[in-house]
Image (tube, rainbow, N blue to C red):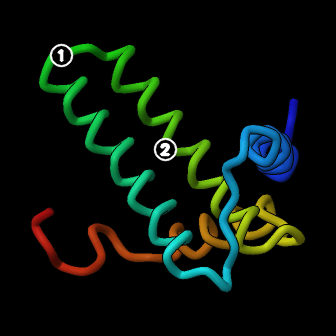
Amino acid sequence: MATLNEYADWIKRLNDKKGFWWYWNDPKGIGTALCLIHSEVSEALEELRDLDKNGVIDELMDVIVRCLHLVRCIDDLLDIDTLMRQILVKSEERPYKHGGRLF
């Protein structure tokens, strides 16, 4: 099974070949990538409105692909797997419904 790092590298290679890349020193490019992530979330909402479970899942996978691509573009040496573990451990330590917000 591939790791998040391996998937991120694969996604970056594929996108580089197709002409899609973003650089940390280009805030407009990073902003564009963030907007594309947002558009995938909006597409997932549209699939939900149509009650299309598979469509929602497909769009959420697109969100993951775009997020991994952007992370790898920002830092091509970042150990995404370790970072994911650290974030999940930190989340486990948080109290129930931390933040006190309703949603």
92 vs 5, left or right, is left
The local crowd at label 2, few if under 14, some if 14 to 19, many if 20 or more residues have their Cα within 10 Å, is many
- The residue lying toward the viewer, choosing from 66 and 18, is 18
Q: Position of residue 65 (x, y in %)?
A: 61, 42
Give the residue drawn at x 42%, y 25%.
57
37 vs 18, left or right, is left
Give the residue at the far bottom of this rendering.
25
The local crowd at label 1, few if under 14, some if 14 to 19, many if 20 or more residues have their Cα within 10 Å, is few
Give the residue drawn at x 58%, y 54%.
67
Amino acid type at image mark 2: Val
Alpha carbon of mark 1 to alpha carbon of mark 2: how far? Answer: 19 Å
Q: Quadrant of the C terminus?
A: bottom left
- Vertical order, 58 against 43 (above or below): above
**Residue 30 in which image quadrant:** bottom right
Amino acid type at image mark 1: Leu
Mark closest to the chain's N terminus, 1 or 2: 1
> What secondary structure is marked by label 1?
loop
Q: Position of residue 71 (x, y in %)?
A: 67, 64
Give the residue drawn at x 31%, y 16%.
53
* Residue that carries the numbered disc 2 in the rendered image: 63
- The residue lying toward the viewer, choosing from 13 and 41, is 13
- Vertical order, 103 against 60 (above or below): below
* Residue that carries the numbered disc 1 in the rendered image: 51
Give the residue drawn at x 87%, y 30%.
1
Q: Do the CB atoms of the residues marked 1 and 2 lie less than 8 Å apart?
A: no
> What secondary structure is marked by label 2?
helix
- The residue lying toward the viewer, choosing from 63 and 84, is 63
Give the residue at the far front of this rendering.
19
55 vs 74, left or right, is left
Of marks 1 and 2, the one in the foreground: 2
